[in-house]
Image (cartoon, rainbow, N blue to C red):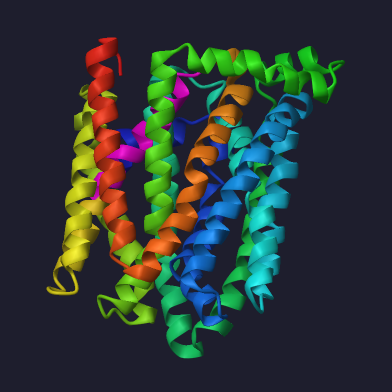
Amino acid sequence: MSLLKHPLIQFWRDLKGNPRACVYPEPLWGIAFNLYAPFATLYMSHLGVTDSQIGMLLTLGMIVQIITSLLGSVLIDKMGRRWSALLLGLLAWTIPPALLMLAQDFWWFFVATLFGGIGLIESVAWNCLLVEDAKSEQLVDIFNWVTISGLLSVFFAPLAGLMVRSMTLVPAMRILYGFALLMMTAKTLTVLWLSRETKQGLIRMQETRHVSYARLLGQYRGVLHLILKSPASLQVLAVIILIQIANTISSNFFALFATQNAGVPEWLIAYFPMGRSAIMLAFIFGIQRQISRFRIKQVMIVGLMLYLAALAALLLSPYASFLLAVYVLLDAFAFALVWPRRNSLLALQIDPKERARILGLMYVLMSGFASPFGWIAGWLSEISRALPFLLNMLLYASCALVLWHSRKTTGDDTI
């Protein structure tokens, strides 16, 4: 079958409305992010930031996410999805790269983290734009394309590796953060230009027009009750918390482990995301559609088991370097199985009439539970760089148990 006739390609070409407005510009953000992300913690380390300080910054970012998710959800309802996505996007994705481009010591990263924490609530506005006018049966493929957009962007990462190799890390990173400033700002503006306010967004703007922020914040008690009274919502919340913590730890401490424990040269770090992305793309276009007949939770449990195997390979890689390749292979398969379905699971279990506030509150709870783990992971890394990944194995195993238990208690055959 020709690639152009692949069902996912046809789906992408047929995208209309807000899903197209959100998916098409996504590579602008993804290219910029994947150029600097593999080297972010190494950049901090070169500028004198310690492992424990890196962990503290992760915890700070989560605390900011708690505050902004509460206030931002109200903002999204009152301003609408489009204009709140613009405002929050500029705060979260324009100011931080500008600061990081000029960073000199820990305090530059501290201030950048304060603004970067707004990114979580910006993603709520963006997710509302993405899914509110979409059909439920389109969600997995929509999130597949969000994933694919990020994966395609990773193929630009070797350019960053070449820059680091020829210029050394700090000057290269300053250029890459400057590039991110332009690209992420362009993405935010493009989404505004291509999108239209969602039907639910117009309803919420009308409903909240003459309601004060204080009163809207007071209504969170009712929204919290909606979450707490639903076993399905609680289980989804547990899943996103555990996966988010594990992903944060892996993305921030892999480069340190690979370079300082497994002996990987710094410039080569950029090639790991590229290899991982190539594997995931082959997986998504090759067999992702074939496994769509299985329930979401079943596929996620398999993916979580692959994450455990991948981490075992990573921890053994200092003794057998080929295991790094095994880690990349298994981690890529796991990501392709877990993340599109994790996002779909979240979208399917949320009352569409209260999407912004429920998402915002779930992110508040997620950040609240996850916030200590940034500091914990940094502290563990200073003891041994293997310990954060042992913690991740515990987190993924716990997540698999939650999903398995949820199937037995709810009898849910739809997901």
The structure residue drawn at horizontal position 16% and vertical position 66%, both measured from the top left corner, is 316
Relative vertical location of residue 179 with respect to residue 268 in this rendering, above or below: above
Q: Quadrant of the N terminus?
A: top left
In this rendering, the count of numbered labels is 0
Q: Quadrant of the C terminus?
A: top left
Q: Is residue 83 above or below residue 320?
A: above
| 221 in magenta | no
Q: In x, y percent, where is residue 87?
A: 75, 43
In the figure, is residue 339 to the left or right of 68? left
- Which residue is nearer to you in this view: 209 or 15? 209
Residue 98 pos. (x, y %): 70, 67
- Residue pictured at 42% horizontal, 35% vertical: 240
Is 267 situated left or right of 116 in this image?
A: left
Residue 93 picture location, percent across and down:
65, 54
Q: Which residues are magenta?
A: 333-350
Residue 47, picture quadrant: bottom right
Position of residue 141 measured from the top left corner of the image (x, y, whole percent): 38, 31
Is any atom of residue 139 visible in this view?
A: no
Task: Confirm whether residue 159 shows in the render.
Answer: yes
Q: Is residue 167 left or right of residue 274?
A: right
Residue at x 31% of width, y 66% of height: 272
In the figure, is residue 154 to the left or right of 16?
left
Q: Nearer the viewer, residue 128 or 27?
A: 128
